[in-house]
Amino acid sequence: NAGVTQTPKFRILKIGQSMTLQCTQDMNHNYMYWYRQDPGMGLKLIYYSVGAGITDKGEVPNGYNVSRSTTEDFPLRLELAAPSQTSVYFCASTLPDGYGSNEQFFGPGTRLTVL
Amino acid sequence: DAKTTQPPSMDCAEGRAANLPCNHSTISGNEYVYWYRQIHSQGPQYIIHGLKNNETNEMASLIITEDRKSSTLILPHATLRDTAVYYCIVRTGTGTASKLTFGTGTRLQVTL
């Protein structure tokens, strides 16, 4: 299994541009998450999904959108990039509550800079 | 979810045990203690979790006090590759979509 994969690894955007961060998992996990991590800080939850067609806001959803059309994919969309969205973005997945350890498996991250 | 308090940084000599403390004095009866670590700029990695009993796996041991208000993660023989930020997280077991709330963690530096 490849686990959780994210593309791209790095990206530089200009203010006002848009982009989609891709996330795919091959572990048949129902739950998926998007986090952002600013320098020296812990991760903050942006959006999450408990299954295809179901998404919900996390702690810092403003400026982002998500969709979940399949179990495997959970893309994160930035519509109008702002310097405040400069961060490292991590995608993660896990099984539902009550299944195993509920550990979250994280992707390698996407480092985004908005200039 | 209950808030956790961890020291910002700790040092440990290679080969010695690293004991990382965590306070979670407002933990509820149905909340688990989870530990993750983040090596450099990689995605966080799950280490171990527990409810009230001590737990051990191939990576570490987790000691939870009887009143469950604090816990200690033990890396029995720390190596340079254990240098990382360690996060102690408390979360409920069900009904929360397994969401995690990360603090700023403890930066563990393992030295020769």
Image (tube, coloured by chain):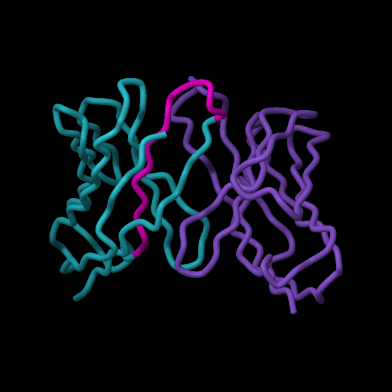
Chain colours: A purple, B cyan
Is B91 a magenta residue?
Answer: yes
Q: Is residue A70 above or below residue B106?
A: above
Query: Does residue B17 appear left or right of residue B24 in this picture?
Result: left
Q: Nearer the viewer, residue A110 or A115?
A: A115
Choose top left, top right, bottom left or bottom right for residue A63: bottom right
Q: Is residue B78 above or below residue A47?
A: below
Choose top left, top right, bottom left or bottom right for residue B28: top left
The C terminus of chain A, quarter of image: bottom right
Q: Nearer the viewer, residue A13 or B58?
A: A13
**Residue B41 position within the rendered picture, expressed as x and y whole percent measured from the top left:** 50, 66
Name the residue rendered at 35%, 56% in the picture.
Answer: B105
**Residue B59 position within the rendered picture, expressed as x and y whole percent measured from the top left:** 30, 46
Name the residue rendered at 55%, 65% in the picture.
Answer: A38
The residue segment tinted magenta is B84-97
Residue at far bottom of view? A115
Name the residue rendered at 46%, 57% in the picture.
Answer: A42
Q: Nearer the viewer, residue A111 or B70?
A: B70
**Residue A110 position within the rendered picture, expressed as x and y whole percent measured from the top left:** 66, 63
Q: Is residue B67 above or below residue A92?
A: above
How many numbered callouts?
A: 0
The N terminus of chain A, quarter of image: top right
**Residue A13 position within the rendered picture, expressed as x and y whole percent measured from the top left:** 79, 74
Is B58 a magenta residue?
Answer: no
The main secondary structure of the magenta stretch is strand
Query: Does residue B64 appear left or right of residue A79 in this picture?
Result: left
